[in-house]
Amino acid sequence: MNTSAFAPLRIADYRRLWVGQVVSVVGDKIHQIAMAIMVYTITGSMLQMGIMLGVTVLPAALFGVVAGVYVDRWDRRRTMLVADLLRAAAVLAIPFVVGYGVGWAYFLAFLASTVALFFVPAKRSLIPDIVPAEGLMAANSLDSASEAIAELGGLAVGGAIVALLGYQWAFGIDALTFVFSAANIALISYRRKSAWVATPGTTVTSEAVDGLRSIWRSDVLRELTGVYVFAAFFAAASIALCYALALVRYDAGAAGVAMLDVATTMGILTGSVLVGRGGLERAGVKFLGGIAGFGVGFALIALAGNIWAAMALLFLVGIANMYFFIPATTLYQTHADQELRGRVMATTATINRISMVVGLVAAGALAETTSIPLLAACIGGAALVVAAVGMTRVALRTA
């Protein structure tokens, strides 16, 4: 079934959420470039770069499951609003504390990422409440496509700000975008009538276990999570390796980081539009095909002798990323019970983020001592193995 990629924008509440997120993503990309350049300028270390990236995903590994419990307990709209305001305060403070040591910047990045643990599953859990089932794939695709466009704008603006004014200004702009997002979320009219009632013997731990059990009892969710955790590891490793490609192999500095990011983002935009044209049919095959496409594209980067060839391949990798990310998100949304959706989203995010932390730090460390082309080939080849194993899982393949 073909669905208009823009159909969800006819829904007022989704449109308000979408507008706020587009602006916020622009700020995030400015922040991301500024953070990377700030850390590399201060430390000159690719290992520190990997640690910095790892710090942003570590909170999910530590607190993600617990956050999911509260996302299911609380009003999701209000949770997102408060999370945006807290993140605005955290990122605004980064340039004021980094003078006391880069560790303070890591701490605030860790804090902002911890707060995001409540925002992201709340958002993904809210979308099925305000968008009908037949429009979910389109809504998730539009979400990814608009993020890609916003990232391109953020790259252009962020590069100019860092080059002309210094990285300090970037954090203030990102804080303002969080405030703008919060204002739009406040206008959302949907109010969830929570079914959660405190009962004797109910604890955060027992509720978190309910989320884990719901994943385990569903063949689709169990197999999806089992494959996704390995895909997340290699996808995270590829992020750190892209920084190494730009800064070390091609010696292209901040401009090179932006160029590779633009190429990947353009692929993400293209892939989002392509995936969004279809409905839920063969979502499992799309997911596994995306992992395989990522593997082929990233393995070929080993042969890329210049940054332009790497950009062309990363464009294809970006397309493939959307073929596994969007179907996976949609499968989680449609196969999780409404009252457990926050826990399912947060639990799977936690499992995947643990894998990502290891992938980011490992790739950053290996990039200092191992051939970067060899690492690219290994990451791509391993992703192909993951896709092949996934195709043997019947429930996932036929989902």
Image: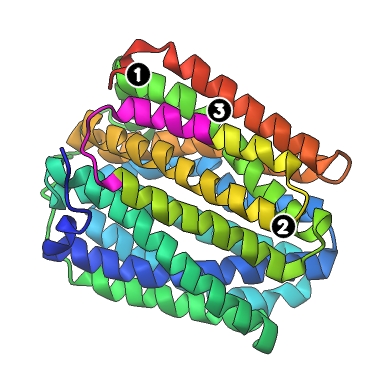
Q: Position of residue 307 (x, y in %)?
A: 72, 57
As shown in the figure, which amino acid type bears the numbered disc 1? Answer: Arg
Residue that numbered label 3 is attached to: 230
Q: CA distance from mark 2 to mark 3?
A: 27 Å
In front of the other: label 3 or label 1? 1
- Dominant secondary structure (helix, strand or loop) of the stretch shown in magenta: helix
**Residue nearest the viewer, comparing 342 with 319:** 319
Q: CA distance from mark 1 to mark 2?
A: 36 Å
Q: Earlier in the sequence, mark 1 or mark 2?
A: 2
Left or right for 374, reference 154: right
Residue that numbered label 2 is attached to: 307
Q: Say whether residue 277 is magenta.
A: yes
Which residue is depicted at the point 43% across and 29% down?
Answer: 289
Magenta stretch in the rendered image: 276-293
At mark 1, the secondary structure is helix
As shown in the figure, which amino acid type bears the numbered disc 2? Answer: Ile
Q: Quadrant location of residue 5? A: bottom left
Q: Earlier in the sequence, mark 3 or mark 1?
A: 3
Q: Is residue 345 above or below residue 46?
A: above
Of the 4 image quadrants, the one containing the C terminus is top left
Q: Position of residue 100 (x, y in %)?
A: 77, 74
